[in-house]
Amino acid sequence: TTAEELVKVLSDEGLSAELVDGYPDALIVRGKLNVDTSVAYKEGLYSLQNLSSQKAVLLLDPKSGSTVVDMCAAPGGKSCAIAEKMGNEGKIFSFDIFEHKVALIEKAAKRLGIDIISANVGDSCVCIDELVNKADYVLADVPCSGLGVTASKPELKLTADPSSFDGLIDIQKKILSNALRYTK
């Protein structure tokens, strides 16, 4: 569907939605959105995603038929948005270190009717030789203190343990180094 068409669909579900300047596929929804009861959501007509995640995909600007590596992909919102932008044509290798999170990527892709995502358990700190020099695009939303979502979850500032962030810089360097290796 298009964003314009989705405004009407959501209106039929009792919600008000408006287009967002600068984000061609984004809507701001007013009202109580409940994905458990939304027929349009279950049919894969839309996903929930914050604007910063959408901005990453807009900036990546992947082309149809491309090969993409999404290195820290769970829960899969950006991988799915990339697939949609590519018209579900090409290949996306999506990785997360936790198996239960890979299942979230697969579930999101299935709901949206996307079949170009290969979701895999993988530590992005470890180079996958088969992907070296293969990717047209690489997305590395490097881990992740969890503080990037404090705007919507301000309580994280109170519960965060700064000592748990000590190793993040080394992890991020390894991931970004592998991202460079994967890029054609």
Image (cartoon, rainbow, N blue to C red):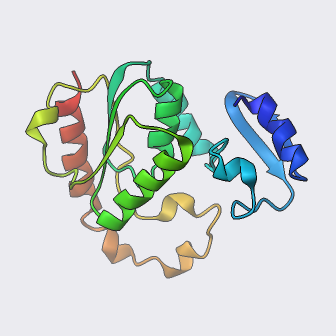
Quadrant for the N terminus, please: top right
Vertical side of 123 occupied by 71: above or below: above
Residue 128, how many percent across, how many down? Answer: 13, 42
Depth order, front residue of 51/34: 34
Tell me the residue at 40%/78% (across/down).
161
The residue located at (75%, 56%) in the rendering is: 38
The reply to whether residue 85 is in sight is yes
Q: Percent from the top left, x then y, of residue 30?
A: 86, 52
Locate residue 101: give its quadrant.
Answer: bottom left
Q: Residue at x 47, y 46 (%)?
A: 109
Left/right placement of residue 42 relative to residue 84 reads right
Judge left or right: residue 171 versus residue 15. left
The quadrant holding residue 97 is: bottom left
Residue name at image x 51 percent, y 24 percent: 87
Pick the quarter of the image with the C terminus. top left
Q: Position of residue 40 (x, y in %)?
A: 72, 47
Q: Is residue 21 left or right of residue 8?
A: left
- Left or right relative to 163: residue 74: right
Work out whether residue 20 can be spotted: no
* Residue 36 image point, x, y percent: 69, 64
- In this view, the residue farthest toward the left is 129
Tally of numbered tags: 0
**The one of 177 and 94 positioned closer to us in this rendering:** 94
